[in-house]
Image (cartoon, grey):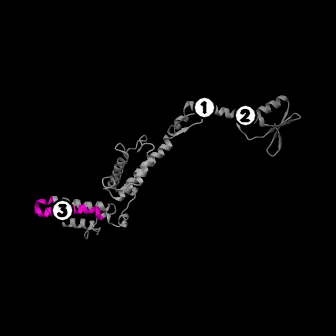
Amino acid sequence: MNEAVENAANIAFGDGGGSAGYVPARASVETPDEMIQKELDAMMEILEENQHMMPEGAYLRGMNALGALHKHKRTTLSQRRPGDVLRCWMTLDEIEETNDGLYNEIMDVADDIVVELCGEEASIYMHDDDVRLVDRGEEPEVFQLLVNYKPEPGNAGYETSPMVLHHAIQVIMVRLFDDTYHELEVVRPVSCQCGWRGAQGNWDRHISNGRHQRWVNIERQIQFQRALTAARQQIVARRADGIVYIDEMHETPAVKIAREEVVTEAEAAGHRVVFVGASGQLSWFT
């Protein structure tokens, strides 16, 4: 029991490493709060196991000392220099990969904060695409509450460590961002030239719809007719002395049809056909 008491006292009041020869099993992963709590739990267990062998006064003094350590634990941690805390800081990815218990604690704190800010029906664990963390339009207010969130007695972030609180708020902000992105990319209304208007998420279904396909075919026919009319007006460079001079335009389906029409018409009239290149070079049609 004396060794457990000494380890807890050394961690709580400045030594940080326990008695000689004592090496925390997971010092690189556990937070100072967790390390102290482990020793306090060990002391409690030893006191309970050996109560029947201890004088009543000794047992009561041990319980009082244990209570005092519990009382001073938070004060002691709050007085540690920032560098002491930062040296054991871990990213959220590192925590998720190496410490399931700590990651679960972060998610639980995040869920408690969500309930605190958004109501009992909200939960960080809701991942249905149709369920938003907050109602549409409330995102700026909740985001501002998270930016200004301060651990105070009675709120969800008061009983946890700065690192856990930091990552818990990160998790909530990521969820708000994901909901907003989903809103913009999937739920937001979009429109089509055919007259349809609906959610972005229904776009693929819309463009494969029979009504849209009929509109596409009609539009293609209209555009082709326009291109054919323009080609018929431009294909003949000039006519002179029984010769039809055809402008060698860029080859398109409309130009091909217009050229064939002019050649057929010229041959039927007994006229010869000459092609005029872009450089002005002439070549007979054979």
Which residue is identified by label 3?
A: 64
For the record, the magenta segment spans 49-76
**Cα distance in 3D space between marks 1 and 2:** 20 Å
**Cα distance in 3D space between marks 3 and 2:** 99 Å
Q: Position of residue 47 (x, y in %)?
A: 16, 60
* 153 w.r.t. 284: above or below: below
* 201 w.r.t. 92: above or below: above
Which residue is identified by label 2?
A: 228
N-term mark: 1 or 2: 1
Q: How many numbered marks have been drawn onto this rendered protein structure?
A: 3
Question: The residue under label 2 is which amino acid type?
Answer: Leu
- Any part of residue 94 in sight: yes
Q: Residue furthest top?
A: 268
Q: Marks 3 and 2: which is nearer the front?
A: 3
Q: Does 258 lie within the magenta span?
A: no
Quarter of the picture holding the C terminus: top right
| Residue depicted at x 43% and y 50% | 143
Which residue is identified by label 1?
A: 215
Q: Does 63 lie within the magenta span?
A: yes
**Cα distance in 3D space between marks 3 and 1:** 84 Å
N-term mark: 3 or 2: 3
Q: Main secondary structure of the magenta part?
A: helix
Q: Residues within 10 Å of mark 3 (few under 14, many from 20)?
A: few
